[in-house]
Image (cartoon, helix red, strand yellow):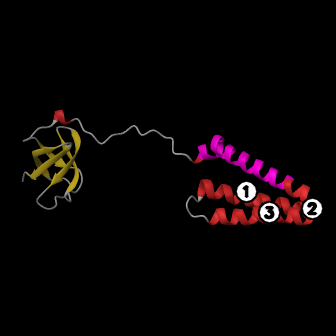
Amino acid sequence: MDIILVVTFIVLGIAFFILEIFFLPGVSIGGIVGTLFTGAGIWYAFAKLGVTAGWIVVALSCFVLLFAIIYFIKGKPLDKMALDKELESNNFYDMSKVGVGDTGVTLSRLAPMGKVLVNGEEYEAKFCEGFLDRGVEVEVIDIDGNILIVANKG
């Protein structure tokens, strides 16, 4: 029964250390609870099982904690949580197909930013004089980077 109690304390302590290192960084609650559980397991091993068993528990606890940390770093658990998808989109438009004076229609409400369709292409646009509803005819009056500055044509 004493060995089961020592193993339970040590396993709980190591579990809280892993939680602290990988899932709750900076909070310190997991580290404190892990230290208390591990310390209680080691103290109980020294008090009830003897000095030799206590040192064996200390050595095994250090080895298992080191193994668990290496397993989490190099193993699959963190890979399953990591964001490794590569984004293939961008926010840049082909501005060579549009020029000042071109006309188009709003695809969304410009409040003041929105989407417009000019020369068959969709662009991000800005209307500086308030709001424009969807479906309103507009004229390009300026190009600022990859944003069209438009005015109401009507």
How far apart marks 3 and 1 lie (CA) works out to 9 Å
Q: Residue at x 71, y 47 (%)?
A: 66
Q: Is residue 3 left or right of residue 96?
A: right
Q: Which mark is residue 46?
A: none
How far apart marks 1 and 2 lie (CA) works out to 21 Å
Q: Percent x, y for residue 65? A: 73, 51
Classified by dominant secondary structure, the portion drawn in magenta counts as helix
Q: Which residue is mark 3?
A: 9
Asked if residue 58 lies in the magenta stretch, the reply is yes
Q: Is residue 68 left or right of residue 140?
A: right
Q: Which mark is residue 14?
A: 1
Q: Residue at x 86, y 52 (%)?
A: 56
Magenta range is 56-80
Q: Nearer the viewer, mark 2 or mark 3?
A: 2
Sequence order check: which comes first, mark 3 or mark 1? 3
- Could you say whether the residue bearing mark 1 is in a helix, strand or loop? helix
How far apart marks 2 and 3 lie (CA) works out to 14 Å
Quarter holding residue 44: bottom right
- Could you say whether the residue bearing mark 2 is in a helix, strand or loop? helix
Quarter holding residue 133: bottom left
Q: Which residue is mark 2?
A: 49
Asked if residue 84 lies in the magenta stretch, the reply is no
Could you tell me if residue 23 is visible in this image? yes
Sequence order check: which comes first, mark 1 or mark 2? 1
